[in-house]
Amino acid sequence: MNKMIVLIVASILLSGIQAQGQTRIDIGQNIHLVCNGDVNVVLEDTRFVNRGFLEAAGSTFRFVGSGFANITGPVFTEFHNLEIEKPGATLFLEQDAEINGNLIFQQGLFDLGFYDLYLSGLLVGESENSRITGSLGGELVVEALLNAPQGQNPANVGIEISSNTDLGLTTIRRGHQTPVSGGGGQGIDRYFDISPALNSGLDATLLMHYFDAELGPVPENELEYWRSTDQGQNWSPEGFDTRNPVLNTVALSQIDEFSRWTLGSTTSLPLPLDLLDFYGQAMEEGNKLTWKTSHEVGVSHHELERSEYGMDDWEILELLEPRPSGNYAFLDEDPFMLTYYRLKFVDHNGAFDYSPVIAISREISPAVDWSFFPNPAKDQIFINTTFSGNQKLMILDAVGRVVKVVEETTSPDQEWILDLSDLAAGTYYLLLQNEHLSAKALIRAAD
C-alpha cells in the first residue's frame, strides 16, 4: 500500500526555502507539500518538478538566479503568487499551471512554451525586458466579469475593453506566436482571443498595449488592428483609430463582436504565400513533415529547419523549390527525442518569412534502458545501456550550448566511462542517442 507523505512548511517556523545553484526540486508521487500562509519559497536556478501535490495558499514561489530554471512534471501545479527575478535569464513553463494570486516580474522572461498559464490575480511589473513570451503557442488565460466595462484591463494583461453592453463572463487568452496572414501580412508577437458570454452588437472599443521587443519587422508607425475568426488561420485588416508609440498602444472602436485580435501592417508583406497546413508525425522510420501552400507568387524556395531546443540552434534540413501542387513532404530520419520544426519561405528578392513552429516528440523505447553514476561527478561518470551498437553522448551547459560530444560502439551492459575532468564545476545536460533511445538527464560536475 502506498503511503502519502505530507511535508508542511509553516511560516511561523520557516520564512523561506532556499535551493542553491542548479537544483532539482522534485515533489514525488506520494508527496503532499504544504506551503500555506506567509511563506517565501526561493528557488535559485532550479528545475521544479511536480509529480505529487502542492498546496500553496498564500505563499510566494520566487524563481531567482541567472541560470536555467523550469516548471515541469506530469501534475497540474497551482501556485498562489509566483515571482520572477532572473536577470538576463528565462523561466520555462513545461506543464499547464495556475496562479491564484499574482504573477510578479522583477527581472527576466517567462517562456510559456506550448503550455497555458491560468491567472486569477494580477500581472505585476511586466516591462520591456521582463515579460511573458511564448512563440510555441502557450497562452496566458484570464477570466473577468465585464458588465458595461469602461477601459477595463482584466488582470492587467494588456488589453483595455470598453462597451456599454454587459458582456458577462469573458475569457481572454493572450498569446505570443507571430500571426501571419494569407497573402503574407505579418503581425506583432502578441494577440488576444476575447470570448465574452454575449458577443454581438457590442459597439466596443479596444486599446491594445505592446512592447517594442514584440514588433519584429512591423513598422510601429504602420500598426493597425487585424482580426481572425478561425483561430489565426486567416486574418483581415480592420484599421485603427489612434496610435501612441510613446505609450505603445493602438485603439480601435465600433467593434461589433470579439474574436482573435493582433496588430500588424498592410505594407510589411514579406511574401505572397498562403500556408494552409503544416503537420508533423513521429513514425518508425523517422519524423514525417508535410505542408500545403497556395498562391505562391515570386517564391524562390522553402527551407525546412529543425532545432533540438526551439531557441537559437536552428539548422537547415532541406531546400525545396516551389511546386505547382503546393504539396510538400520530408522525412527526418535522424530526429531528436523532442524536435522543433519551422519553415522559412524566401522570395527572389531575398525577403523571407517563417511559419509557426511545430514540435514532434518521440517515445522512449521500453526495450532499451540506461543508467549512470555517480551524480554529482568529479572527474568521470560511468554509463550503462542495454543497447549494442553506435551511440552518441552530448553534454550541454545550462543555456544549451554543446560543450562535449563523444561517439562510441558498445555492447549490451558494457560500462562506458565519460571523462568530465575538462569541465568546470556546474550543471549540465547529458544527452544519449542511439537508434532505439533518445534520452536526456541532468548531471552535475563537482569541484
Image (tube, rainbow, N blue to C red):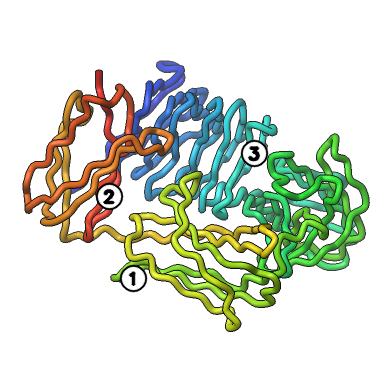
Residue 311 visible? The answer is: yes
Image point (67%, 74%), residue name: 296
Lateral position of residue 115 relative to residue 220, left or right: left
Asked if the residue at tag 1 contacts the one at tag 2, i.e. Cβ–Cβ closer than 8 Å, the answer is no
Label 3's element?
loop
User: Mark number for residue 80?
Assistant: none
Q: Which residue is mark 2?
A: 439
Q: Nearer the viewer, mark 1 or mark 3?
A: 1
Looking at the image, is mark 1 or mark 3 earlier in the sequence?
A: 3
Residue 315 rendering spot, x and y as whole percentages = 46, 53
Q: Mark 1 highlights which residue?
A: 283
Q: What is the quadrant of the C terminus in the image?
A: top left
Q: Earlier in the sequence, mark 2 or mark 3?
A: 3
- Cα distance between the residues tagged 1 and 3: 43 Å
Q: Amino acid at mark 3?
A: Gly
Which residue is at a point 7% across and 53% down the rendered structure image?
412
Residue 38 located left or right of residue 30 = right
Residue 182 image offset from top left, x and y in percent = 71, 69
What's under tag 1, amino acid-wise?
Met
Q: Spatial distance from mark 2 to mark 1, Cα to Cα?
A: 18 Å
Percent coordinates x, y for residue 222 in the rendering: 85, 51
Residue at 51%, 53% (x, y): give it: 114
Mark yes or no: residue 30 visible: no
Query: Nearest the camera: 223 or 25?
Result: 223
N-terminal label among 2 and 1: 1
Residue type, mark 2 in image: Ala
